[in-house]
Image: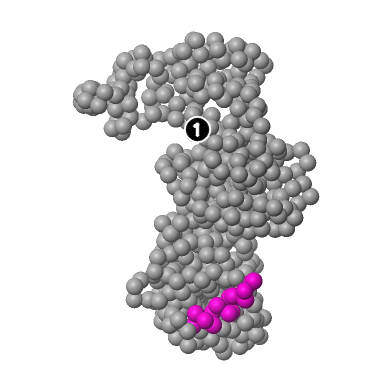
Amino acid sequence: MREHDDFVISWLVEQELVSAAALSAAQKSALETRTGVIETLIAQNVVNSRTVAIARASICEVPYVDLSHYQIELKNASRLPRSAAESLCAIPLFVIDSIATIGMADPMDLRAVDQLRALLKLEIEPVLCEPVHLRALIDQAYAMTGTQGAEAISVASSAATLTTGKEPVVAAVNQIITQAIERGASDVHIGPDETRLHLRYRVDGRLQVAQGPSLTLHAGIVQRLKVMANLDLTQTRRPQDGKFRFTAGTVSGTRQVDIRLSIIPTVCGENVVMRLLSSASSIKTFGELGMAAGMIETMNELLKSPNGMVLVTGPTGSGKTTTLYAALAELNSPDRNVVTIEDPVEIRLPMIRQVQTNAEIGLTFAGALRSILRQDPDVVLVGEIRDEETARIAMQAALTGHLVLSSLHTNDAPGAIPRLLDFNCPAFAISGSLLGVIAQRLARRVCVDCSRPAQVTPAYAKRFALDPGERFCAGAGCARCSGSGYRGRLGLYELLMVTGSVQSALDGGDAVRIRRSALESGMKPMWMDGLDKARLGLTTLDEVARMAAVASIDVATTEGVRKAA
């Protein structure tokens, strides 16, 4: 493409994307470093590679295709040998009516176009793509097919052959995990059925179907993952769990990720689920999680308490652990002894002593908690209160001078109190130890790139008691959000403070009475927190309705409080 560089530079200058001064500086630097002027302009951040690609496409009079979010059809890649794709820097993107649309770095290379026509035996319609995205797509496509395209190769079955990094099985595993990291997935599902191997990524709480490897690679992929997690390669009839660290080379740079691996046998073969664990550097603040300013202030006051218990509640996958880690980040300092009991330890934190439970040797939450209380802790995190023994010991610790953080599985914040009573914790102990309960859900964020005003349906207007003319938004769907209209997630919260009126409602464990007392004491229901965020354009009414139920007691009580005020 160097022969077109002068035309590209002229186009950039004409479009006022490069100034005369910037061009002069780049030309001088290019002479000194013996590189191209355009490469120097990109390196100096004067223009980006996408702008240059669009300029080249305009000059060559061919379409430009952005591959950064393109998902290739693997059957198209199989039409072309990998050696040809790499040497020509080209790959079939679409094949419609005997016409192949080919992504190329240089569509003006007529020799390459003729060679592609001969190999594919189809008419060729070239489009221009950025070379870096083109090469990444070629690597991805041929890793997933497990072949060299038209040049099929055999897959070794021995575990010893799966360790050099050059085999198709290794390439497929690396590509699957790297793609999960680039998509921001929390989990990877690899499951076989009788005819194909299914690959899905959980992104923003929803499973998304992706192009996966062929079924013939399934056994090799499972073996490779077992090698990486140091599991028993000979065992295929019982579940196995493991963990490993993966180093990925993504477009944004090299990144290390800890991965928890779960394998279970099914009637069609072993099913794999990988959980991508966050690193300590990814721990967010309460504000970044989506808490309102007033709630953040209250939470910080709770965490300043020398003793007592703070609970986080919600269903599985609602972000409870993330909130607890945000609290630990606030508390973590050299003058505090912080100890955690977790199953499993998801994020390793500096200075904090973290204990992994192990039921096989009797190291349960309750057993570990007893030992930890002899370690002179200031703050204790119990990953989850699952049984009566753990609940009673944790409450005793909160009553005897320790700040205890933990989680429960309940649908709302007031529901934590009846759950503790179910664990035979005395009402007086709950009243004396429990400082506050925060309940949460994770709602999807509206994609900022395709956010548009949205019509409010009469059903939502009635359900949320909306005023006429209130404005909300929704995502139209774009390449950045894979057409979903959402990108990222934020928390919806409700925070119950154990005030005098709530303490008075403890006896008997009546959840309705406790909730009414909490609302009268100023607790904002979760759906109202979601409604506030929908008004700000952060999420949609659909997400609020899906994640947070609107209880009739909430509407009646909050309306009564409003009228009394």
Q: Which residues are magenta?
A: 359-373
Q: Determine the residue positioned at 49% across, 64% down.
A: 323
| Amino acid on which the number 1 mark rests in the picture | Ala
Q: Determine the residue positioned at 65% across, 55% down.
A: 232
The image position of residue 340, as x and y in percent, is 49, 72
The image position of residue 290, as x and y in percent, is 47, 58
Q: Quadrant of residue 419?
A: bottom right
Q: Is residue 29 left or right of residue 430?
A: left
SS class, disc 1: helix
The image position of residue 76, as x and y in percent, is 63, 25
The image position of residue 127, as x and y in percent, is 51, 19
Q: Main secondary structure of the magenta part?
A: helix
Is residue 370 rendered magenta in the image?
A: yes
**Would you say residue 475 is visible in this rendering?**
no
Q: Is residue 207 above or below residue 492?
A: above
The residue labelled by disc 1 is 136
Q: Determine the residue positioned at 56% across, 87% down.
A: 429
Q: Is residue 122 above or below residue 148?
A: above
Q: Quadrant of residue 384?
A: bottom right
